[in-house]
Amino acid sequence: MLMSASHKEEETIMRFETGKTRSRRALLAAGLLAMTCAFSGLASSDAQAQTIEAIKAKGKLVVGVQADQIPWGFIDEKGQNAGLDPDVARLIGKELGVEVEFVRVTVPNRIATLLTAKVDVLLAVMGMYPDRAKVVQFTRPYSVSDIVVLGKKGDSIKEIADLKAFRVGVSRASAQDIAISKQAPQGTSIQRFDDDSAVVQALVANQVDAIGGQISYMANINKIAGEGKYERKILINRQYNGFSVRPGQKEFTDWLNAFIERNLANGQLNAINKKWLDGDLPEFPTELAGIPFTVQ
Amino acid sequence: MIRDFTINEFYFILQGGIATLLLSLIAFIGGGLGGLTIALARTCGIRAFRFASAAYIDFFQGTPLLMQLFVVYFGIAFLGFPLNPWVAVAIGLTLNASAFLGEIWRGGIEAVPRGQSEAASALGLGYIHRVRNVVLPQALRLSLAPTVGFMVQLIKGTSLAAIIGFTELSRSGQIISNATYRPLLVFGIVGAIYFVICWPLSLLSGKLERKFSTAR
């Protein structure tokens, strides 16, 4: 189980490690996460229950967010945490009537940070996968990371088979690399770059015709190349993100699920999504295989 | 969504530089004291001390600093003793730097001709005198270059403290690079700041070496 967990983790780490994708570091991080998994039994057994009352009495909610994932979680020009996740976290704080304190987590350390009770909850673009659900308690999904193919306006890319006629750029060993390498027809020219910004540069510099990436790249491309030159072509993969808490926190998990349901219904979560990702939230599934949304 | 690189972004990186300086200082002080202990234990006459310090060096040289920091910060918290990140990083960097400095200085101590300490013994000098006034000054001279080399490595190695949540120089560069999409500019600045921190050390080392060689 540990083997498969670390393998899965590595893929995901590579996807999000946009700064510099160094496979050696990712491997090490995967090892650390495997260790986290090994430790987690110990951690969950002595974790204290977080009741809503206890959080209110404490007067603050400590939230783990990422700091280098525009537009999910980043540091704004004033040095403050900003982005989709911090906005959702502030909404949680508002409803609980407590202050929100942010802890900046990274992909390799976020689960350990949660399990050692250094944060109350993670809103760290954490994709919901069964391996992770064995270690943390996910809530229902509140956002999606879509992996898409982006290309020049006018190029005809309607399905993945069309990629054969184009040069495609991806960041090496990322989810988009894995998905496109698997699905694209034989003989497609796939060029692999070290990180997201290099992939985007390659597209803008016309070294490739299309790229695989997150939907949130679009805003960055428009800023660099000017509006209207590039567009989203096809959806390759959809990842659902959930909040995560320590296992066994029934009351807190139930409250968070109710929070998501309430704010999906009243449109607040959609408004936040629109603000940062420039699109509406899709319908969320009511269940995901192997990932319980409530404490079992 | 991405923004321009302005003085604010530069300031953010500079703050990371200050964190890097503080981390390095902690590592130098902790590693210096620990390393001296290890080096002396490694070269003393008591077999158990020699064996224990050799095992210590092998373990900490043989495992990555990233893992050591991770285990100190998160591992100890799992056992029910949550550590402040500064305490954790001080422990982790000290343990690691002690092993490397200990081994470097052991080499220096052993390179001092045996006759020196034998002569000091013959003159009736006790262990402390012998080590402090005869062996160590000569050993220091011999190990100056590798010591400075390791310190420079260590400064750059403090970037690993990002794993336990420190926003030091490399990490702040990463954050700004992903916020501005100007990686060349950002990491150019980060590199320049590292250089500004490390270069004086190398200068100092050259100066000391010249000073020592004229004293000979």
Image (cartoon, coloured by chain):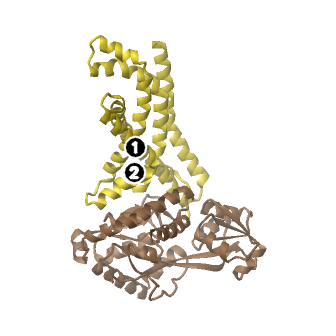
Chain colours: A brown, B yellow
The answer to whether A2 appears left or right of A202 in the picture is: left
| Chain designation of label 1 | B
Residue A125 spot, x, y in % from top left: 47, 71
* Mark found first going from the N terminus, 2 or 1: 2
Give me the residue at 45% from left, 23% from top: B111
Give residue B89's position: percent from left, percent from top: 36, 49
Which residue carries the number 2 mark? B68
Vertically, is B167 above or below A252?
Answer: above
- Badge 2: how crowded within 10 Å, few (<14), some, or many (20+)? some
Name the chain under label 2: B
Badge 2 amino acid: Gln
Spot occupied by residue A174 in the image (x, y as percentages of width and height):
59, 67
Q: CA distance from mark 2 to mark 1?
A: 8 Å
Residue placed at 36% from the left, 47% from the top? B92
Q: Is residue B188 above or below residue B129?
A: below
Question: Residue A74's spot in the image, x, y percent?
Answer: 47, 63
- Do marks 2 and 1 share a chain? yes
Q: Is residue A267 visible?
A: yes
Hey, what amino acid is under mark 1? Asn
Lateral position of residue A289 relative to residue A235, left or right:
left
In the foreground, B207 or B36 = B36
Residue toward you, A141 or A217: A141
Q: Residue beneath label 1, please?
A: B96
Considering depth in this image, is A121 or B103 the residue closer to the camera?
A: B103
Residue lying at the far top in this picture: please name it. Answer: B123
Q: Can you tell which quarter of the image residue A235 is in?
A: bottom right
Quarter of the image that includes the N terminus of chain A: bottom left
Who's the residue at 46% across and 18% down the image?
B212
